[in-house]
Every structure is written in structure tokens, then in C-alpha cells.
């Protein structure tokens, strides 16, 4: 949104955080006041359940920021339900129908686009790739970090299978006798985080801490205080298709990133330029790479600076907003 505004686009917001039928009633009332005032209706993430409603409300073209498949996330990655269940069918249809009704579908990698085309039998011409980017570049650190004299390894995000949080925990165990390296995990304090904390206590890992979910302003502080950030280390299908938000956010702040090697990363990064890869699902490889970075902090900083250059060249809101505006103009 900020990128579109930077490119002279007026945005009229129509959104609701209501649940159930109240959501649709709220959207209907808001849209009624705006229905003659816009050229394109943009459905943002996660709008899979409202694209059909948008189609009823307008005859204007619809751009849908799908971002990720609900079927891929909930059935393939998280394994919430069996692939043969009615829930699996529901999520498959949710992806299929929402994308079928949209005029343009946005995804962040060509790998994801190919997945959608193959899995949901959708026409390739509907899809456009646009990277996620980040708007944290101009934010200032707000809080003074209390950990001094340590090489801080940072990870943030929700704990889901493709993240491979178990790999990070095992790597921390392998490095527990290295006094200079400290791990920090920022995540939602839910049952998964509590189980992780129990494992940390059970393994007597004093080199790792868990912090509850923070605001974007606070996140900037922790990113800036870190020496290196971690991406994802799982080896399932979702890990092979996406470039996670946490990677964008880290390079935005000029921080080097270690993540599991996946072909999809080559859509944006060169190996060793802003990004360091290790074999997925391999804690020993991660621990060894962290030791290598710890012993060569200047090279580590150089990689982080290269990542920032990738951001400045490819990922700023203004650049992505311009790309999106060109996509929109194609269907006007």
C-alpha cells in the first residue's frame, strides 16, 4: 500500500476484522459508499474467503494477493487434516475458486506460481510474480538491548513445520559449550512455544532464550541487535516454494541470513550474497556455519551489507509499488 502511494496511487480502504456473517455485512456497507470511486478492487492476504464476495460486489477487475496456498499451508505443511479429508477438499476448493474468480493473482515466487498452476489447474497468464519486500527499512530501534559481548543468533516467526525450529534447537545444543554464541527466538507464546521451552530446560541450554511476539518497532530493535539471522530449515514442499518474510525483514536491516538451501532462493539471491545456505534439516551443518560466521565477523557483516543492496535494488516499497502499478495498468 505504501509502495502504491509512493507511485501516486490513491487507495480507498475497505476492510473488516469481524468474524462470520458480520464481516460480509461490514464489507458490503463500506463498499456501498465507495463503489463508484475506484478502478481496481484489490483483495489482500488472506482474502481467499472474500474473493467470491468481491466478485458479487463489483464488475471492476479484481487483483488478488494470494501470497500462499491455504491447502499447502494447512494440509501439506502443518498437516492439520488428512489429505483425504473433507477439510483438505475445502482448502483445495478455497484456493481454486478464489484464484479462478480473480483477474490477476499475485505470488512471490515463480516456484509458487508453478505450484498453483499444477495443483489447481489454473491458467498461467493469470499469475504475476512480485516479491514480498519489507517496510522496516526506515524504522528506528526503540529499546536498548541488554545482551552485550555475545554473537547473537536471531530467529523470529510462528512455529510451523517448514521453519525447522527443531534444527535450530539442536544446533544450539551442539554449540552450548561455545560461550560467545547466544540464540534468541521471538515467537507467539502458544503451546508450541511452551513445548520448545520445556525442551530447552530439559537440555539445560543456557545459550538460548524465547521472547514473546513483539511489535514491528520492537522487532527492528532485536534485528539490529543481532549478528546473524536464521531463516527456515525444514525440507518439505512449502520450504521449496517460498522465500519467508523473516528473510526479507533481516536483509532490510542489513543482517546476514543463514537458511536451508532451496532452489527458489535463486529467484532473488546469489549464494553468499546477502544469504548463506546450509543443507536443510541438518543441525550439524547449521552449527558449523554459525561457528564459521562467528570466527569471521567482518565477512559476516559484508554479506549482510550485500543483502541490504539487494533490498535497495529490488525490494523497497517504491520499487514493488511501481511493479504492481504496471501489473494493474495491464488490465485496466
Image (cartoon, rainbow, N blue to C red):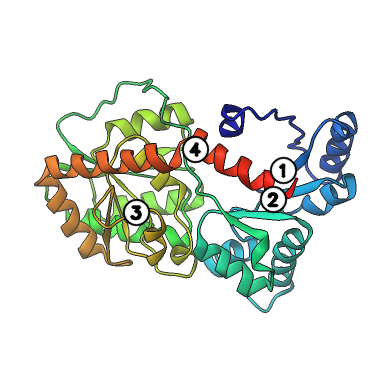
Question: What mark, if any, has residue 269 been given in the picture?
Answer: 3
Mark 4 packing: few (<14 Cα in 10 Å), some, or many (20+)?
some
The reply to whether dot 2 and dot 3 touch (C-beta < 8 Å) is: no
Q: Which residue is mark 1?
A: 42
Query: Percent from the top left, x then y, of residue 64?
Result: 69, 50
Q: Assign the C terminus to one quadrant of the image.
A: top right
Q: Which residue is mark 4?
A: 319
Mark 2 packing: few (<14 Cα in 10 Å), some, or many (20+)?
many
Query: Percent from the top left, x then y, of residue 63?
Result: 71, 48
Question: What mark, if any, has residue 143 been given in the picture?
Answer: none
Given residues 81 and 316, the one toward you in this image is: 316
Q: Quadrant of residue 114?
A: bottom right
Callout in the foreground (4, 3)? 4
Q: Name the N-terminal-most of marks 4 and 3.
A: 3
Residue 123 to residue 42: above or below: below
The local secondary structure at tag 4 comes to: helix
Given residues 5 and 224, the one toward you in this image is: 5
Mark 1 packing: few (<14 Cα in 10 Å), some, or many (20+)?
many
Given residues 40 and 175, the one toward you in this image is: 40
Q: Which residue is mark 2?
A: 64
Can residue 176 be seen? Answer: no
Residue 244 to residue 40: above or below: below
Could you tell whether 264 is left or right of 14 in the image? Answer: left
The residue at the point 23 percent across, 54 percent down is 272
Q: Name the N-terminal-most of marks 1 and 2.
A: 1
Amino acid at each position: 500500500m505504501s509502495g502504491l502511494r509512493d507511485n501516486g496511487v490513491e487507495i480507498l480502504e475497505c476492510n473488516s476484522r469481524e468474524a462470520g456473517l458480520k464481516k460480509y455485512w461490514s464489507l458490503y456497507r463500506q463498499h456501498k459508499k465507495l463503489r463508484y470511486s475506484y478502478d481496481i478492487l484489490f483483495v489482500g492476504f488472506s482474502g481467499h474467503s472474500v474473493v467470491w464476495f468481491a466478485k458479487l460486489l463489483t464488475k471492476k477487475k479484481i487483483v488478488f494477493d494470494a501470497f500462499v496456498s491455504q491447502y499447502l499451508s494447512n494440509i501439506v505443511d502443518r498437516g492439520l487434516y488428512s489429505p483425504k479429508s473433507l477439510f483438505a477438499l475445502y482448502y483445495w476448493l478455497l484456493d481454486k475458486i478464489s484464484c479462478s474468480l480473480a483477474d490477476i493473482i499475485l505470488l512471490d515466487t515463480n516456484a509458487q506460481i508453478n505450484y498453483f498452476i499444477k495443483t489447481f489447474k489454473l491458467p498461467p497468464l493469470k499469475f504475476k510474480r512480485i516479491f514480498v519486500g519489507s517496510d522496516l527499512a526506515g524504522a528506528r530501534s526503540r529499546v536498548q538491548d541488554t545482551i552485550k559481548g555475545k554473537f547473537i543468533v536471531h530467529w523470529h516467526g510462528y512455529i510451523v513445520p517448514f521453519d525447522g525450529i527443531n534444527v535450530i534447537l539442536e544446533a544450539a545444543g551442539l554449540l552450548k559449550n561455545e560461550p560467545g554464541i547466544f540464540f534468541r527466538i521471538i515467537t507467539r507464546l502458544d503451546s508450541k512455544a511452551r513445548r520448545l521451552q520445556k525442551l530447552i530446560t530439559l537440555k539445560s541450554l543456557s545459550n538460548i532464550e524465547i521472547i514473546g511476539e513483539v511489535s514491528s518497532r520492537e522487532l527492528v530493535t532485536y534485528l539490529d541487535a543481532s549478528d546473524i539471522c536464521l531463516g527456515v530449515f525444514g525440507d518439505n514442499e512449502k520450504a521449496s516454494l517460498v522465500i519467508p518474510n523473516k528473510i526479507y525483514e533481516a536483509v532490510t536491516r542489513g543482517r546476514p541470513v543463514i537458511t536451508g538451501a532451496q532452489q527458489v532462493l535463486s529467484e532473488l539471491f546469489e549464494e553468499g550474497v546477502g544469504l548463506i545456505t546450509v543443507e536443510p534439516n541438518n543441525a550439524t551443518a547449521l552449527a558449523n556455519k554459525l561457528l564459521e560466521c562467528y570466527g569471521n565477523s567482518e565477512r559476516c557483516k559484508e554479506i549482510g551489507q550485500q543483502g541490504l543492496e539487494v533490498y535497495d535494488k529490488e525490494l523497497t516499497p517504491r520499487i514493488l509499488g511501481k511493479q504492481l502499478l504496471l501489473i494493474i495498468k495491464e488490465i485496466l
